[in-house]
Amino acid sequence: MSVVMSSPASDSAPKTQDERDLLLYEGRLQRPQMAKTPELARNGRLRHVIFSGQFNPALLDELAGVADVIRQLSKHRAGQDFLISLLHHKRAMLYFTQPSTRTFLSFMAACQILGITCNEVRDPQTSSETKGETRFDSLRMFSSYFDLIVMRSPMARLAESCAYLMNDLERSGNRSVPIVNAGSGADEHPTQALLDIYTLQRTFNFTSPNDSSYSSRFETLRTTPGCENLTKGLSNKTYAFCGDIGRGRTVRSLAMLLANYENVRLAFISPNHQSLQMREDLRERLTARGAQFYEFDSFEQTLDGKPIIETLDALYMTRVQREHDTSDDAAGYAALDLTQYCLTPQLVSRMKPYAPILHPFPRDQHFGEIPTEIDNDPRAMYFRQARNGMWARAALLAHVFDVDGHIMRFFHNDFSV
Amino acid sequence: MSVVMSSPASDSAPKTQDERDLLLYEGRLQRPQMAKTPELARNGRLRHVIFSGQFNPALLDELAGVADVIRQLSKHRAGQDFLISLLHHKRAMLYFTQPSTRTFLSFMAACQILGITCNEVRDPQTSSETKGETRFDSLRMFSSYFDLIVMRSPMARLAESCAYLMNDLERSGNRSVPIVNAGSGADEHPTQALLDIYTLQRTFNFTSPNDSSYSSRFETLRTTPGCENLTKGLSNKTYAFCGDIGRGRTVRSLAMLLANYENVRLAFISPNHQSLQMREDLRERLTARGAQFYEFDSFEQTLDGKPIIETLDALYMTRVQREHDTSDDAAGYAALDLTQYCLTPQLVSRMKPYAPILHPFPRDQHFGEIPTEIDNDPRAMYFRQARNGMWARAALLAHVFDVDGHIMRFFHNDFSV
Amino acid sequence: MSVVMSSPASDSAPKTQDERDLLLYEGRLQRPQMAKTPELARNGRLRHVIFSGQFNPALLDELAGVADVIRQLSKHRAGQDFLISLLHHKRAMLYFTQPSTRTFLSFMAACQILGITCNEVRDPQTSSETKGETRFDSLRMFSSYFDLIVMRSPMARLAESCAYLMNDLERSGNRSVPIVNAGSGADEHPTQALLDIYTLQRTFNFTSPNDSSYSSRFETLRTTPGCENLTKGLSNKTYAFCGDIGRGRTVRSLAMLLANYENVRLAFISPNHQSLQMREDLRERLTARGAQFYEFDSFEQTLDGKPIIETLDALYMTRVQREHDTSDDAAGYAALDLTQYCLTPQLVSRMKPYAPILHPFPRDQHFGEIPTEIDNDPRAMYFRQARNGMWARAALLAHVFDVDGHIMRFFHNDFSV
């Protein structure tokens, strides 16, 4: 993926300080992700959260454990009081120049669970940028007043550049704060991938409130025909993604994280249209990681000799992001039957009894990729997924501020309901 | 009053999920209020606050008592600290797609008095609705992250529908939070009615800081000619409403609540213009309740043989809501002398010595229904009324979250100045 | 400076209540500052913060001491917890109808350091003013719900009028809250002057973490050729201001405050253009105070026989405020070489080794008055200056709410790291 940070005039010499600032980091931005990861960590934990690639399975397990405990503690007043006191001396800046209600509000809620006070800048027009201030000067201002910057921007890699800026400031003895990427253009949205994984982790734990030492949901499921080899956890599963594969950064990030688990198969179901199909760069990255993946144009195409809708272990639906359509796109769609990529109760009834349906939300009532009739199906996981976003983000912030250990100790030693 | 929820195309079949969602509740929306009330309560207290009709005199007395105590506690640091600690683990969403600074800020302040952390969504353009999300999906998102939704919308009965949505979610074992209606179209504004009543309750207590066991303001008033039969409380009073009676939802709600008290007379003073006069539906509802009411077109028309300005016990002024004028309205007003419906110091001097002047605010400096010369008259109650809104809303939230008993016990047992 | 509060139609009789409200205070607004100061104080401390002229050197020293202690306390969790608990029962309204990200956010952060809960109204369009509410009614509403109003407005002297309104309310037994001016038109921006002074106070303390009883930075500096007579503190210094002198209210306020110190010289370096040069009213005020000041059009003009760039003790750079340009201004600039008023590494290398570079920020990347190459020079003080704004504003709020003594006692008696 190329760096899409400069203005149209990028071929010629940079004219503004904003352009020169970004050029400064060009070399560091162009490195492979693996070379960047150490720079984004500090003392064995994440300092800046920029890529979903920073989450390896061990860290994902750890964060899921913290998220679970925060969720448990939040059910009781004593637990809530403990959590609120943890970081109530911290102030966060939510710098969202690209609108996103859901991500914004769940970060707000996540901060508030830990007692962090939130501040926001959402409209770039009200900011000092209209007075000629550079983005980096704005960011340094935020880092002067606040202890954390959560940022969402239409510019790919702006968050990454800001992380480097903070590191350079730290090295020169200046104030520096953690940067958390809440979505950077079409590029990365690591905390969405985190909450998707957390939702799968919870689902594939196969527990039920009715579990006892005599019987459990997991054991019962394993006696169901076709589910004999079911295992707990994210390994040994087939994950299907349906809809706007080409432009869905959440699909891309989640697929790459799932490819880290053992014996995983990925199926991408999308219309035969170049904007919506998997892009070459994702194909290359999955191939490089040795992932098994399949490209389909229908729920009826087969895997293991059966239609994919019947063999998948989890289904990740997406919205067709029409706001990114070119005029060519709209014309191209006319020839396609896009309703095929909408779920129906009939399709759901053919899915495995445990297979969760996820969606990064919002869903589109006009496209109708998930009709509301499905909402009451126990496999419909998308509303819980949204709430999981709050727990997963709270866990991540606890990790970044190094209070996760404190949380785990409190839960295990001091907390009794 | 008809349900004004669907789009202009409502005659034909519903086309969007938003339209279908509302249709789902059509039957429940059409029931008489009495049939709805139980569904909005839980364990003998309000769960959702949707109609002013949910407030009966007993509950209004109880809420006034809580509001009084919150006001007393807020005068001292120990009381403030106690209040702030009550609900500091709760997060509220203020979802205001119809602008209202005063209602918005007083809800914010009310939440903060009790320690509730506030979040807001005010501009529907920045929300996910532009990505095709339904209103109900947005509401479920808010209920995922927050513990209370205070909503103000230009759509009549949207808040009511959302309360039913929350109840349905609760029934199906999903997360559900209280809905508080902060104004729904021309329909209902229950917390305004609550604060109006609270202001009257405080005023008609007739106490004074100078009261002693030898003399009291109430006893002194009763020796004033014409006030011999004065009683404490909201009963046995004549309430006059002046101005935009037709379109004032606050007038409608307050009048209906006052009709629940004994020996109450209601006088509506408005220009002879169909947009501004009392509407048929309010006439019918007051008649059904057996209320005594009068329609006047001047402060000089008589009741008990004297001009109404001299006989009223309380005067509720309103702003002519020109933003709701049709083009016909403006033409019709030209023939009227609207200045008659503006208060003057001369008129005020003829009022009873204790009769409070209320106004839901903002007042309109261009129309001039209450000139600033009157602000220093002891009967001018409209600024205190605004501040009472904060106390009354805090009391209501304490009731909804079931901490009102805790507040009363603390005040009576543990609190000493 | 004339009162610029009324609309263009101000010659004729006032038509709106807003105009009449302001006229009411005309007499008080026209008094000399000295006559106003007592009215803005209460019990020997500032009640309302309206003018930079309210800060005398003794108060500036006191506030700097409080700011230093708040900064020290904020480095440790116990200190942060103490500070957060101080005013967590207070609610502030930040009423910013003129946009300013930096001032706004630093006030937010300052409030949060002391535990004050913040609320904001920024877009006058969403406020009740569109319904005909007067500014004074809006302000009384804010004072009903909140305990402090921090306001920034494009109208000169609106904040001052609001302070008088609050005082009048107090006198008539009504609720009244402190007003803090966060910038009123081209008129006053007292907290910017406060943070500029605080930055100079810290810089001219000449301390270093490496100071010991054997050697100190101050003593070392005094052995440097040309610095033999260096003294600690703000007296005995030459302060240079460069850029938009004419329209910079920060320059005006800071210059007037510096003129209160002993043996101070002020040099104003600006292009030969009437919009950018010092205005007559500042000349008169400085002369009246007996200040020594110089007007230059280049860094190379001499003072004490050497170019000013080599003799200044502190350099205050400013942005040319092009948003205030008239069409004549733009034409006039074409004939000037404005690049002369931009700093370069070469110029900085000629400055005294300790002379701080300040800038009220944002700086303008298009004008380039301070290129980023200078950011790493130890004399570049502008980023610290921004952070100092937070400490200075927190100290000011602590003073207004009378908890500064509490802070000092805690630091000296109870606090040990």
Image (spheres, coloured by chain):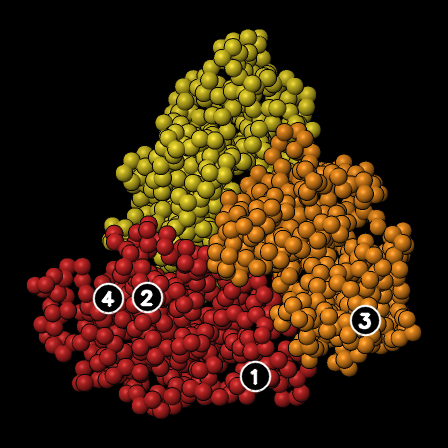
Chain colours: A yellow, B orange, C red
What distance separates the C-alpha of mark 3 from that of mark 2?
60 Å
Amino acid type at image mark 3: Glu
Left or right: B331, with C278 as reference point? right
Q: Which residue is mark 2?
A: C66
Amino acid type at image mark 2: Val
Mark 3 residue crowding within 10 angstroms, few (<14) / some (14–19) / many (20+): few
Q: Which residue is mark 4?
A: C379
Picture disc at residue C25 = 1
Amino acid type at image mark 1: Tyr
What distance separates the C-alpha of mark 3 from that of mark 1?
44 Å
What distance separates the C-alpha of mark 1 from that of mark 4?
45 Å
Q: Chain of mark 2?
A: C
Left or right: B71, with C103 as reference point? right
Q: Nearer the viewer, residue B286 or C134?
A: B286
Q: Which residue is mark 3?
A: B228
Q: Chain of mark 3?
A: B
Of the two numbered discs 3 and 2 in the rendering, the one whose residue sits closer to the viewer: 3
Check the image and name the residue furthest to the front: B214
Check the image and name the residue furthest to the left: C214
Q: Do circles 3 and 2 both sit on a common chain?
A: no
